[in-house]
Image: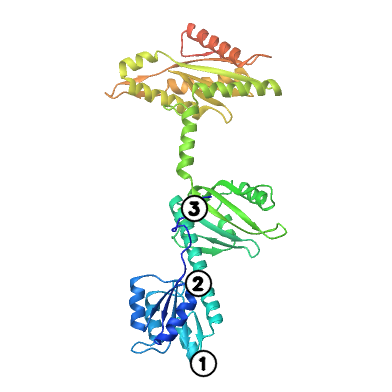
């Protein structure tokens, strides 16, 4: 068995007894001590206030009729320092007029007992007031812990009464949407009308799943409209409270601003799939896209073309005009691809000065026509380097379409062969040649 330390044991409740009659004070003190209370007895109101200034008590028993400072005036002085939730005060009085009792409650008394004191009644009322105080303090501590945890997590809180459709949202909940940092209550539309239209079905589905018992808790990432017209990404979590029949009547939870996390995730995803210089797909993602398109074209039997674009003598551009100028040229080519390609076409940077385009649902002749538009646009564009010198850039294109049963690798090899055929014929052209 483990020994329980003195500090681990619950301390006895402490009672301050202010009673000017010494015999009554000593008798009541002894009887309370036998009940397990720690009792400090004082003869008047001023001594009671001094005792309270020196230490904390769980309850005060205060005689009404005392010299110098009466019990009712002592009560007023106590309430100026502490409210009834922190320190219950029971008045001991010989007065039985209703206006005197009302006056005591108006001044902040928690309860009263009459003289001569019925100890059983007094003990019951003391026990009740101390239990109430303990419950209030525990509730306050629990609420403070929860509030501190929520503030520490920087979360907003929400509480939805499902039966009455009353939703409470905390100041932080509103603040993360750019609204005044004050709590607010209203219908559930207070929340749902702020959800991004594209995410509303997702939120409703997650809520419905939890409320009908299909999920242990509610959790959903979605966008919320902010006061500036933009959107904030949030993670909403909650849990329903159910009646004896399992029907939900309330759901409460938290809302966390995850905008920065989502932005970081999107940036990581972008970095993993896109070329940092041009913003087009990088080689790995382009090849993954091509594998998917070849598989789809094979399954659904539609045409698919693939095209290489290689800038002519690009090394000379870097050597003559500098690498920063060369980077500007690469970005300009990427922008031309975006401008001239059709919806559904997929462009990427294969490496160095080489670009690729995937043309779903496209025969090679049509792909070459698109390539020619890009080639002529690039040929007509004048570039300027940092010293003001003007120069032009040309590009060579090689395209191929998917043969029956061919793989992505085969399609790449055929487009590469077309590219080198175009280079052998003098560059700045497309292959196969455009049919007129």
| Mark sitting earlier along the chain (1/3) | 3
Query: Is residue 118 left or right of 179 when viewed as pictured?
Result: right
Crowdedness near tag 3: few (<14), some (14–19) or many (≥20) residues, C-alpha within 10 Å: few
Mark 2 neighbour class, 10 Å CA radius: few under 14, some 14 to 19, many 20 or more: some
Dot 2 and dot 1 residues touching (CB under 8 Å)? no
Q: Position of residue 202 (x, y in %)?
A: 62, 46
Q: Secondary structure under badge 3?
A: loop
Residue at the spot x=53%, y=50% of the render? 1
Q: Secondary structure at mark 1?
A: loop
The residue lying toward the viewer, choosing from 380 and 374, is: 374
The residue labelled by disc 3 is 3
Please tell me which of labels 2 and 3 falls first in the chain: 3
Mark 1 surroundings within 10 Å by alpha-carbon count, few (fewer than 14), some (14 through 19), many (20 or more): few
Q: From the viewer's perspective, is 325 left or right of 334?
A: left
Judged from this view, the residue extending furthest toward the top is: 424
Q: Position of residue 405 (x, y in %)?
A: 68, 14
Residue extending furthest toward the bottom: 97
Residue at point 38% right, 85% down?
A: 73
**Quick check: can you spot residue 347?**
yes
According to the picture, the residue beneath numbered tag 1 turns out to be 96
Q: Position of residue 94 (x, y in %)?
A: 48, 91
The furthest residue to the left: 387
Kindly identify which numbered label has been placed on residue 130.
Answer: 2
Tell me if residue 199 comes above or below residue 374 in the rendering.
below
Residue occupying the point 52% across, 52% down: 255
Between 263 and 226, the one nearer to me in the picture: 263
Q: Is residue 97 above or below residue 342?
A: below
- 371 versus 29 height, above or below: above
SS class, disc 2:
helix
x and y percentages locating residue 48 in the rendered image? 36, 79
The residue that appears at 46% across and 64% down in the rendered structure is 11
């Amino acid at each position: 068995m483990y020994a329980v330390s003195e500090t681990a044991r619950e301390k006895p409740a402490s009672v301050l007894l202010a009673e000017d009659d010494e015999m009554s004070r000593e008798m009541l003190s002894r009887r309370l001590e036998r009940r397990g209370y720690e009792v400090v007895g004082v003869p008047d109101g001023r001594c009671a206030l001094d005792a309270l200034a020196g230490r904390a008590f769980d309850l005060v028993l205060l005689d009404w009729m005392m010299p110098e400072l009466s019990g009712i005036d002592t009560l007023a002085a106590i309430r100026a320092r502490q409210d009834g939730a922190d320190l219950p005060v029971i008045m001991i009085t010989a007065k039985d007029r209703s206006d005197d009792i009302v006056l005591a409650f108006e001044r902040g008394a928690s309860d009263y007992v009459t003289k001569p004191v019925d100890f059983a009644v007094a003990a019951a009322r003391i026990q009740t007031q101390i239990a109430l105080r303990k419950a209030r303090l525990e509730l306050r501590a629990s609420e403070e812990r929860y509030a501190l945890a929520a503030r520490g997590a920087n979360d907003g809180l929400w509480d939805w009464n499902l039966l009455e459709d009353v939703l409470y949202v905390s100041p932080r909940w509103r603040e993360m949407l750019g609204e005044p940092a004050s709590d607010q209550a209203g219908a559930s539309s207070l929340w749902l009308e702020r959800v991004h239209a594209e995410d509303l079905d997702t939120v409703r589905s997650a809520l419905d799943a939890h409320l009908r018992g299909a999920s242990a808790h509610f959790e959903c990432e979605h966008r919320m409209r902010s006061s500036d017209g933009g959107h904030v990404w949030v993670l909403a979590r909650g849990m329903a409270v159910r009646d004896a029949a399992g029907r939900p009547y309330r759901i409460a939870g938290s809302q966390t601003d995850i905008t920065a996390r989502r932005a970081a995730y999107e940036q990581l995803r972008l970095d993993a799939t896109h070329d940092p210089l041009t913003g087009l797909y990088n080689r790995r993602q382009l090849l993954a896209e091509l594998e998917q398109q070849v598989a789809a074209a094979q399954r659904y039997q539609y045409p698919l073309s693939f095209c290489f674009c290689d800038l002519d003598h690009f090394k000379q551009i870097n050597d003559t005009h500098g690498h920063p100028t060369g980077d500007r040229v690469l970005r300009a080519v990427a922008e031309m691809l975006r401008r001239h390609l059709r919806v559904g076409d997929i462009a990427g940077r294969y490496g160095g000065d080489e670009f690729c385009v995937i043309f779903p649902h496209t025969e090679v002749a049509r792909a070459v026509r698109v390539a020619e538009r890009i080639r002529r646009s690039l040929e007509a564009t004048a570039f300027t380097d940092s010293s003001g010198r003007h120069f032009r850039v040309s590009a060579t294109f090689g395209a191929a379409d998917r043969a029956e049963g061919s793989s992505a690798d085969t399609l790449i090899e055929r487009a590469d062969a077309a590219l080198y055929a175009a280079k052998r014929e003098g560059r700045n052209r497309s292959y196969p040649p455009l049919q007129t």
